[in-house]
């Protein structure tokens, strides 16, 4: 599948089949995330792979009771590491670049999962401190996104997008 077809096919899936994701696919997704660009190539983020059923249920509860998270065979948690970015970029690194790094890595993982025939949905609505406790990271770490991954248990329709005229502003000579 070429990149533009991939972009057209990606959907936010909120129902998953009870089928495990094999290690080869998971490794390919993690490698894609590792290839994401980052500020100063610092990769100021970590990824937590969650497959424990009880932890997935806890993540679902911490995510405003989005129960479908617990249906997925796994979820990736993308965690910003502000200290790592601050070492080179100071306050802007800690408050922005580390968040961007985690976000871009999550995007690469999401697209890789789609290319591999898997389904995902980006979760940003969650209680940060509860997620920290579930995955066992320090208060300095910032959970940015939860990405449930599995085989689709539904086929959502494509959602509408803003027109380019409403989205893009040109500053040209």
Image: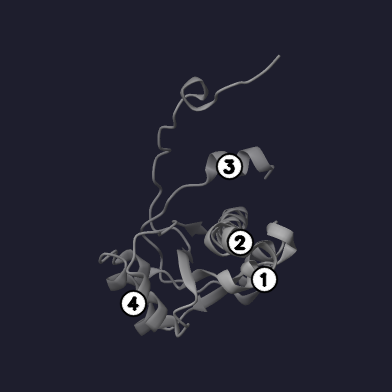
The location of residue 9, given as percent across then percent down, is: 54, 43
Q: Which mark is residue 93?
A: 2
First in sequence: mark 2 or mark 1? 1
| 10 Å crowding of disc 4: few (<14), some (14-19), many (20+) | some
> What residue sits right under mark 4 in the picture?
130
Q: Which of marks 4 and 1 is in front?
A: 1
First in sequence: mark 4 or mark 1? 1
Q: Which of marks 3 and 2 is in front?
A: 2
Q: Distance between the residues labelled 3 and 1?
A: 35 Å
First in sequence: mark 3 or mark 1? 3
First in sequence: mark 3 or mark 2? 3
Q: Which of 129 and 32 is in front in this view?
A: 129
**What residue is at 46 percent from the left and 23 percent from the top?**
166
**What residue is at 61 percent from the left and 44 percent from the top?**
6
Q: Distance between the residues labelled 2 and 4?
A: 24 Å
SS type, badge 3:
helix
| Residue 81 seen from this side | no
> What residue sits right under mark 1 in the picture?
87
> What residue sits right under mark 3 in the picture?
7
Q: How far apart are marks 2 and 1 (CA)?
A: 8 Å
Assess whether mark 1 and mark 4 are in contact (beta carbons under 8 angstroms): no
Assess whether mark 4 and mark 3 are in contact (beta carbons under 8 angstroms): no
Q: Distance between the residues labelled 3 and 4?
A: 32 Å
């Amino acid at each position: 599948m070429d990149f533009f077809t991939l972009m057209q096919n990606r959907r936010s899936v909120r129902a998953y089949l009870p089928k495990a994701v094999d290690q080869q696919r998971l490794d390919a997704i993690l490698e894609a995330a590792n290839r994401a660009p980052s500020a100063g190539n610092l990769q100021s983020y970590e990824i937590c792979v969650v497959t424990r059923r009880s932890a997935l249920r806890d993540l679902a509860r911490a995510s405003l009771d989005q129960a479908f998270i617990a249906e997925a065979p796994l979820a990736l948690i993308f965690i910003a590491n502000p200290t790592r970015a601050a070492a080179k970029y100071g306050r802007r690194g800690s408050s922005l670049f580390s968040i961007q790094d985690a976000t871009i890595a999550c995007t690469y993982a999401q697209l890789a999962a789609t290319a591999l025939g898997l389904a995902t949905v980006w979760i940003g609505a969650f209680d940060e401190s509860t997620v920290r406790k579930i995955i066992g990271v320090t208060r300095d770490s910032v959970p940015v996104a939860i990405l449930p991954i599995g085989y689709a248990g539904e086929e959502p329709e494509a959602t509408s997008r803003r027109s380019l005229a409403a989205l893009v502003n040109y500053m040209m000579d």
